[in-house]
Amino acid sequence: AGRVRPEDSDIHGIRAEDTREAAPFSEDWELFAGARARGPFGAHFASTEDSLIRAAWPYARMSPDFSRPGSTTAEWGPWIDTGRLIPGCLKGLRSARLEDIVADLGLQTELDALADQHCPAGRARYHAALYDALAAALLLVVLGRRPEFSEMTFPWLFANSVAGGEARDSIQQDRLF
């Protein structure tokens, strides 16, 4: 196990003694590559997760490119990013922070119930990976419950998960050749 920085302990609640017996992240290639082959990844401000994965494995195995049906890619993305998607779709939120959006949408009780089922003891908190993943997934489900978003598609989700401009154009552009 590697060193756990004090700032990581403060933010994520992970201590060196919590990881001492854990296998290195890099040993989970099959888990991550297999998951990527089955569907796109999503997260709240996905650049952090993308950087962590790329630090271990710069490229995924060849997998479906869910932004361009029928195509394949060796990339980990594009990502469904609720940190950009939700504030872009739902006006009146106080911020793009995950905990603020969950509170603004009245989802804390539902999130805590999911965390009770799925999170290890002491890990049902913001900035813990599984808890944040559950929160991001819940935000997508809640968005899809709204009639105006009930017909969401992967290309639409990807296009609305980027800042705009060239990145959005690239996702929306079909290949000519």
Image (cartoon, rainbow, N blue to C red):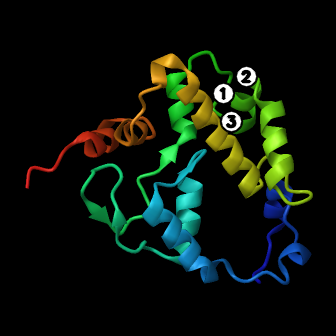
Q: Residues within 10 Å of mark 3 (few under 14, many from 20)?
A: few
Tell me the SS state at disc 2: helix
Q: Report x, y in % for residue 114.
A: 79, 44
Q: Which mark sits nearer the N-terminus, 2 or 1?
A: 1
Q: Disc 3 versus disc 1: distance between alpha carbons? A: 5 Å
Q: Quadrant of the C terminus?
A: bottom left
Q: Could you tell me which residue is drawn at 58 percent across and 73 percent down?
A: 31
The residue carrying mark 1 is 95
Q: Quadrant of residue 87?
A: top right
The correct choice, above or below, for 6 with respect to 172 in the image is below
Q: Could you tell me which residue is drawn at 58 percent across and 46 percent down?
A: 45
Q: Report x, y in % for residue 33.
A: 49, 72
Q: Report x, y in % for residue 43.
A: 58, 49
Q: Report x, y in % for residue 96.
A: 63, 32
Q: Could you tell me which residue is drawn at 75 percent across and 81 percent down?
A: 2
The residue carrying mark 3 is 97
The reply to whether discs 3 and 1 touch (Cβ–Cβ < 8 Å) is yes
The reply to whether discs 2 and 3 touch (Cβ–Cβ < 8 Å) is no
Tell me the SS state at disc 1: loop
Q: Amino acid at mark 2?
A: Asp
Q: Is residue 166 visible?
A: yes
- Using the image, tell me which numbered label, if any, was put on residue 104: 2
Tell me the SS state at disc 3: loop
- Using the image, tell me which numbered label, if any, was put on residue 162: none
Q: Disc 2 versus disc 3: distance between alpha carbons? A: 10 Å
Foreground: 87 or 68? 68
Foreground: 55 or 5? 55
Say whether residue 97 is left or right of residue 152.
right
Q: Disc 2 versus disc 1: distance between alpha carbons? A: 9 Å
Say whether residue 104 is left or right of residue 52.
right
Q: Residues within 10 Å of mark 1 (few under 14, many from 20)?
A: few
Say whether residue 141 is left or right of residue 23.
left
